[in-house]
Image (spheres, helix red, strand yellow):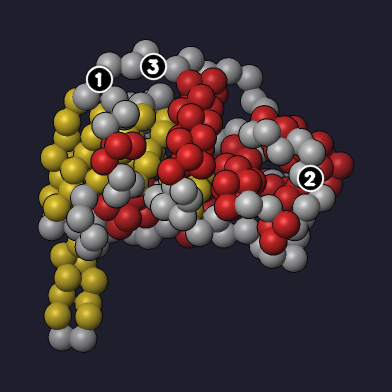
Amino acid sequence: MYTLTGVTKNYTRGKETVEALRGVDLTIEDGDQLVIQGPTGGGKSTLLQMIGGLDRPSSGSVELDGVDLASISEARLTRVRAEKIGIIFQSFNLIPTLTAQENVETALVPLGVKPSERRAKAAEALGSVGLGDRLTHAPSELSGGQQQRVAIARALVKNPKVLLADEPTGNLDEGTRDDIMALLEGLWREHGLTFVMVTHDSSIARRAPRLATIRKGRITLTEQQQQPRPQPQPAL
């Protein structure tokens, strides 16, 4: 479970101080699906970075299972990210010189997984997102939707507790967007993930059980349609 208390984040631009987050309080239960929406510059990506341990707040606490990501050492924070948090980006962030399988394997290297086991787990993860026949393809040989599926497999191969997605459909056409969202929602249910996503797309935001709207660094929560909480399943 996440508990964010009084989270602020300030950036300095020249002589100006920008308040990206202003005293955010937020609880995210295990197995929740939460969408964060808001205008450009409103603080939504900054909030996701706090949740993912990619940045630290200027003040306040970001607790995951009772561990404050804002105050632990950098080494421990890196370990928490490697073990518990999978992240998907709008730009895919694949390494162009590696195959799909090798890109997925990169998520397992910090965990000390043996090469043979890495290869097997990566192949299984790619199969779970419909790319079992694309293991040896480079990113340049894949469509945008296929590249995002590789990125999803990379995020899930380590069996994380939390899946974070920053505009995961922003570079995709409408049809591919719907396919990727169906895949993500299916994986959320299947694996019992805590799923937090940033999107500017209102049609996607309306599908989530919980919506956090953030404007000028302040958050408003809306409970939307009720969906059954997923039950955790065995690892990939």
Looking at the picture, which amino acid does disc 1 mark? Gln
Q: Amino acid at mark 2?
A: Leu
For the question of whether residue 74 can be seen, the reply is yes
Residue at label 2? 135
Residue density around tag 3, few if under 14, some if 14–19, many if 20 or more, within 10 Å: some
Q: Are marks 2 and 1 in contact (CB under 8 Å)?
A: no
**For numbered disc 1, what is the local secondary structure?**
loop
Q: Residue furthest bottom?
A: 14
Q: Nearer the viewer, residue 141 or 95?
A: 141
C-alpha span from label 2 to label 1: 38 Å
How many neighbours does mark 2 have within 10 angstroms: few (below 14), some (14-19), or many (20 or more)? Answer: some
Give the residue at x 86% y 42%.
Answer: 116
Q: Residue at x 51, y 42 (%)?
A: 176
Q: Are marks 3 and 1 in contact (CB under 8 Å)?
A: no
Q: Of the residues shown, which amino acid type is indicated by label 3?
A: Arg
Query: Does residue 161 appear in the picture of this structure?
Result: no
The residue pinned by badge 3 equals: 229
- Residue 66, image x and y in percent? 36, 35
